Amino acid sequence: MNSIISPSFYILSALFLLFALQTTLSSPIQQTLIQCLSQHSIPSSTIYTPNNSSFSSVLVSRAQNPRFVEPTVPKPELIFTPLSESHVQAAVICSKEFGIHLRVRSGGHDFEGVSYVSIIETPFIVLDLTNLRSISVNINDNSAWVQVGATLGELYYRIAEKSNVHGFPAGICPTVGVGGHITGGGYGILMRKYGLAADNVIDARIVDVNGRVLDREAMGEDLFWAIRGSGGGSFGVILSWKIKPVAVPDTVTVFTVTKILEQGDTKLLYRWQQVADKLDENLLIRVLMQVTNTSTTSERIVTTSYQGVFLGACWIGSLLDSNGFPVNTSLELLLQRNTTSASFKGKADFVREPIPEFALEELHKRLLEEDIPLIVWTPYGGMMSKITEYETPFPHRKGTVFKFHYFTNWLDGDKNVPKHISWIRSLYNYMTPYVSKFPRGAYVNYRDLDLGIKKKGNTSVIQASVWGVKYYKDNFKRLVKVKTEVDISRQLFQT
Ligand SMILES: Cc1cc2nc3c(=O)[nH]c(=O)nc-3n(C[C@H](O)[C@H](O)[C@H](O)COP(=O)(O)OP(=O)(O)OC[C@H]3O[C@@H](n4cnc5c(N)ncnc54)[C@H](O)[C@@H]3O)c2cc1C
Ligand SMILES: *[C@@H]1O[C@H](CO)[C@@H](O)[C@H](O)[C@H]1NC(C)=O
Ligand SMILES: *[C@@H]1O[C@H](CO)[C@@H](O)[C@H](O)[C@H]1NC(C)=O
Ligand SMILES: *[C@@H]1O[C@H](CO)[C@@H](O)[C@H](O)[C@H]1NC(C)=O
Ligand SMILES: *[C@@H]1O[C@H](CO)[C@@H](O)[C@H](O)[C@H]1NC(C)=O
Ligand SMILES: *[C@@H]1O[C@H](CO)[C@@H](O)[C@H](O)[C@H]1NC(C)=O
Ligand SMILES: *[C@@H]1O[C@H](CO)[C@@H](O)[C@H](O)[C@H]1NC(C)=O
């Protein structure tokens, strides 16, 4: 971890984390916590300390970005894997009582690993919700309760089991966790027709700072608003979501057209920017821009793949297609919980007007300078423009033509990590004039700890307001207000 990253953790937590440090820990921490948990009848088989031989494998099993489990990165004092809602309540109560930080992990896909790493607030424990993964789909009243430890693939699979004309507008990658994903917004191939996953939530169960379980009615509309798009970890531990499946056709047409992006020929890409957000909302065409070797000369070239989904054939097949599998692949694939072996750093931008061709040329050049880069262009418009900026904390709606997702990957043992990180930071700087401004938008599900940093002379200061308005625009103020109210009022009830 480089040192620039750590201070923003501090602000993130100072302002937004649920559990403030209250007392100095009596040592050893593990013993104290284990004792507290066992007083709440927690079975010891759900508690892993570094003494347990499976501690590392449990930690790594849901760490989607391997760079955050390297030996130099701080490790939790213990990992607790609850089997029931009451176990989660006990974890909140015990960690609060002993002033130990709690990191909550559902699917472990956080870009910066914050669901299993804490740099500044140490010691910390990880509450891993992977065992809370039941899904009950009720097609008759068009609803489903899904626990946070389920993956998107499991959710899609369970819906498809009940109906081939229902789906859910969430993310593309099946291993992403329902817990972090939905609370951060959650977009996928149905977004132009139905909006984000968070736009299709009708109820939720959450454990608050005092360990109480609240549903929508008990938590109130402000808190219910806040958890649908603000990103995880700030307002309590979400246990489950009640979602509204949406109608999908039983057939979907998919296509992928891959073009070599020749130097000096960016016309098609330029043209895509002019139409992508204006197409019929049943059609989504995203662009994957990457570097590959030509088969003949092994020369590195940039390709653009125009990946289209038309809701008019089996939507679940289109999901497989978007993940690079043949549409007739067995659906059981959606149940796999693979972790990747590649580490990555990602960043996002929202684009409001087409990027000029000379800048596309520069992008082309920059891609060739990096080992395993990827830029995903995701079109907006359709339903995304119809939902107002204030409906949920996620504000990037009308006027957004498309979203950029910049990515760089590297494999285990790569010695050039600083080079990869500077490549993506430099690309991000270069794009400044062409993307949204005042604020430059960001997506909390693509968490980027660079964002809070403000340069003053040759020192860097971290300001919560900097990343806050990037992720939420004007909604940041309301989130801070809700956060303050929730923490204070719940404490007042405690007598
Ligand atoms: C390979 C890959 C593909 C992706 N594809 C998409 C995509 O198609 N669309 C999209 O929108 N996003 C996508 N994402 C981003 C993804 O939505 C976010 O990383 C999301 O936060 C992951 O949720 P998680 O539960 O897996 O992650 P976690 O790492 O477990 O959690 C993420 C954050 O939420 C908090 N959190 C987790 N569970 C809870 C809970 N129960 N209560 C409160 N807070 C909680 C964590 O503390 C952390 O802050 C992708 C990410 C990866 C790595
Ligand atoms: C971890 O070790 C402790 C102490 O030896 C034991 O009580 C507990 O059951 C172990 N946990 C697991 C998950 O095996
Ligand atoms: C872990 O092991 C050490 C030595 O083997 C022991 O002193 C310590 O109490 C153990 N911790 C727990 C939580 O069991
Ligand atoms: C591309 O070719 C280079 C050598 O020219 C090689 O090192 C690299 O592994 C190749 N990449 C892929 C994806 O085949
Ligand atoms: C999928 O289709 C391809 C060609 O259309 C065929 O070769 C393959 O066997 C099919 N796979 C399955 C699992 O049906
Ligand atoms: C998961 O890993 C297995 C074995 O490596 C592989 O065959 C499968 O395609 C992977 N699944 C996904 C969804 O990536
Ligand atoms: C800025 O950097 C210079 C040279 O590294 C150093 O001498 C100076 O003290 C720094 N200023 C501040 C405010 O840190």
Image (cartoon, rainbow, N blue to C red):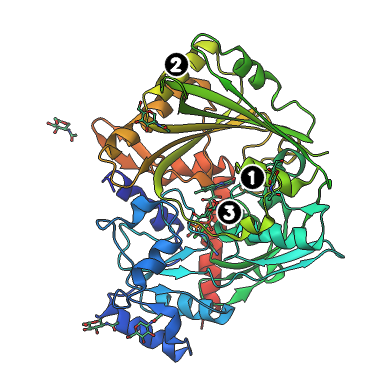
Instruction: Quadrant for residue 194, please give it.
Output: top right
Choose the circle earlier in sequence order: 3 or 2: 3
Residue 283, position as x, y percentages in the image: 76, 33
**Residue under label 2:** 362
Say above or below: 25 vs 257. Answer: below
**Residue under label 1:** 187
Q: Residue at x 67, y 66 (%)?
A: 146
Q: Is residue 136 visible to the viewer in this orientation of the structure?
A: yes
Q: Is residue 137 left or right of residue 495?
A: right
Circle 2 residues within 10 Å: few <14, some 14–19, many ≥20:
some
The kind of residue on which mark 1 rests is Tyr
Residue 360, position as x, y percentages in the image: 51, 17
Q: Residue at x 31, y 79 (%)?
A: 30
Q: Is residue 227 left or right of residue 372?
A: right
Q: Residue at x 41, y 75 (%)?
A: 95
Q: Nearer the viewer, residue 456 or 433?
A: 433
**Residue under label 3:** 181
Circle 3 sits in a helix, a strand or a loop, which is it?
helix
Labelled disc at residue 206: none
Instruction: Quadrant for residue 188, please give it.
Output: top right
